[in-house]
Image (cartoon, helix red, strand yellow):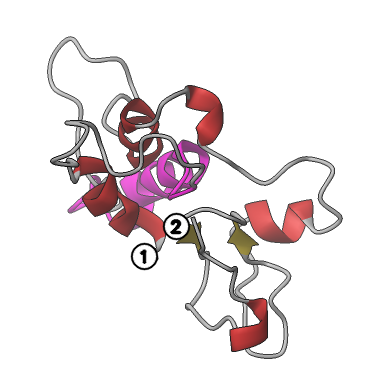
C-alpha cells in the first residue's frame, strides 16, 4: 500500500478487524507535516483571504489545541508510538530541499522527496514521480 501527503489519513482511519486498531499501528510512516500544513495555512490567510482555511485538511473544534486536527497529529495518534511518525532527519544531506517546500521532485531529481523505507506510506512534496528503482520495497 502507498499513500501520498494527506491521503495517509485513509490508512490511519482504516481499522484492522483482527486488532481493532489502525492498519498503520505498528508501522513507521510519514504524511503531510504540521510544519507544511501550518505554513501553507498562514500564507493562505493573505493570498486566499476569501478562503483562508483552504490549505487545512480539517479544522480544530472548540477546546482542541492548534494543530490537533492536522494530518500529522491525526496520523500520529493512530500509530503505536509517536516516534513511528517519521520526518526528514536533520542529518539528511538534502534536508533543506526536502523540507523547504520550494523544490519539487522530478524524474531527473528525486532529492526533494522523502520516503520512509520498510513502511507502507510515503510523502511527496511534488508529484509522485519516483522511478521503479527509487521506490521502496514494501515487504512487511
Please give the name of the residue rendered at 25% of the width and 37% of the height, measured from the top-left corner. Answer: 22
Nearer to us in this view, 124 or 26: 26
The answer to whether residue 91 is above or below residue 130 is above
Does the magenta portion include 46?
yes
For the residue carrying disc 2, how many other residues have a C-alpha within 10 Å: few (<14), some (14-19), or many (20+)? many
Residue 129: x and y in percent read 53, 83
Q: Which residues are magenta?
A: 30-54
Residue 124: x and y in percent read 51, 65
**Contact flag, marks 1 and 2 (Cβ < 8 Å):** yes
Please say whether residue 118 is visible from this viewpoint. Answer: yes
Does the magenta portion include 26?
no
Q: Nearer the viewer, mark 1 or mark 2?
A: 1
- Numbered circle sitting on residue 1: 1
Left or right relative to 129: residue 79: left
Q: Which residue is mark 2?
A: 121
Please say whether residue 131 is visible from this viewpoint. Answer: no
- Numbered circle sitting on residue 78: none
Residue 125: x and y in percent read 52, 64
Looking at the rendered structure, the secondary structure element under dot 2 is loop
Nearer to us in this view, 111 or 40: 111
The answer to whether residue 62 is above or below residue 72 is above
Amino acid at each position: 500500500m502507498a499513500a501520498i501527503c494527506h491521503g495517509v489519513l485513509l490508512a490511519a482511519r482504516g481499522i484492522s478487524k483482527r486488532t481493532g486498531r489502525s492498519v498503520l499501528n505498528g508501522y513507521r510512516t510519514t504524511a503531510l507535516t504540521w510544519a507544511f500544513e501550518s505554513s501553507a495555512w498562514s500564507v493562505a490567510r493573505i493570498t486566499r483571504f476569501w478562503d483562508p482555511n483552504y490549505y487545512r485538511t480539517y479544522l480544530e473544534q472548540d477546546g482542541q489545541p492548534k494543530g490537533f486536527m492536522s494530518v500529522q497529529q491525526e496520523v500520529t495518534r493512530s500509530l503505536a508510538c509517536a516516534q513511528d511518525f517519521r520526518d526528514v532527519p536533520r542529518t539528511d544531506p538534502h534536508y533543506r530541499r526536502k523540507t523547504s517546500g520550494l523544490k519539487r521532485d522530478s524524474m531527473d531529481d528525486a532529492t526533494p522527496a522523502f520516503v520512509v523505507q520498510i513502511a507502507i506510506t510515503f510523502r511527496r512534496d511534488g508529484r509522485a514521480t519516483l522511478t521503479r528503482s527509487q521506490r521502496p520495497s514494501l515487504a512487511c
